Image (cartoon, rainbow, N blue to C red):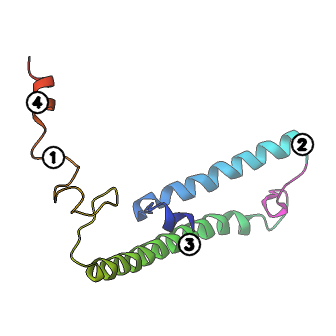
């Protein structure tokens, strides 16, 4: 939902941050246990004999969730680009500006300044 609507991308190079989040949460849970003497999640109780399994599974689950989300966002992004291309070709020759106005309203010019051609007023402000 959110990832598709806000156009945020998840890059595989950011996967270590998902693992880091899991590590920080484990330390946070340990601190809460030592303060309150109860576990919010019983599988994180390190006093159990099989506590190694959840501590190894947690990073695997976090990494898998991150990679699946990344793949899902890439697929939905491609799908939305195909939809946009289809609706753009069905327009009646009117180009849309970034503010949603047709090119006829703006006189065929884009309201944005080209990075290669700065405005004269911007140049005048920077020159002594």
**For numbered disc 3, what is the local secondary structure?**
helix
User: Disc 3 designates what residue?
Assistant: 64
Query: Could you tell me what secondary structure mostly forms the magenta stretch?
Result: loop
**For numbered disc 2, what is the local secondary structure?**
helix
The image shows residue 114, relative to residue 49, as above or below, that is: above
- Which region is colored magenta? 38-47
CA neighbours of label 1 inside 10 A, class few (<14), some (14 to 19), many (20+):
few
User: Disc 4 designates what residue?
Assistant: 123
Question: Residue 26 location in percent, x, y?
Answer: 70, 52
Mark 3 or mark 2: whose residue is earlier in sequence: 2
Question: Residue 74 location in percent, x, y?
Answer: 41, 73
Left/right of residue 11 with respect to residue 66 in the rendered view: left
The reply to whether discs 4 and 2 touch (Cβ–Cβ < 8 Å) is no
User: Disc 2 designates what residue?
Assistant: 36
Q: How much space separates mark 1 and mark 3, taking CA atoms?
A: 40 Å
Between residue 107 and residue 7, name the one nearer to us: 107
User: Disc 1 designates what residue?
Assistant: 115
Q: How much space separates mark 1 and mark 2, taking CA atoms?
A: 57 Å
The image shows residue 124, relative to residue 39, as above or below, that is: above
Left/right of residue 119 with respect to residue 5 in the rendered view: left
The reply to whether discs 4 and 1 touch (Cβ–Cβ < 8 Å) is no
């Amino acid at each position: 939902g959110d990832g598709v609507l806000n156009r945020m991308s998840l890059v595989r190079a950011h996967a270590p941050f998902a693992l880091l989040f899991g590590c920080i949460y484990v330390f946070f849970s340990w601190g809460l246990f030592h303060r309150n003497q109860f576990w919010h999640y019983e599988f994180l109780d390190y006093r159990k004999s099989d506590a190694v399994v959840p501590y190894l599974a947690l990073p695997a689950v976090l990494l898998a969730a991150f990679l699946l989300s990344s793949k899902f966002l890439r697929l939905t992004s491609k799908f939305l680009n195909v939809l946009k291309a289809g609706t753009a070709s069905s327009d009646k020759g009117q180009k849309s500006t970034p503010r949603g106005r047709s090119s006829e309203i703006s006189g065929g010019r884009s309201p944005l300044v080209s990075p290669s051609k700065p405005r004269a007023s911007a140049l005048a402000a920077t020159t002594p």
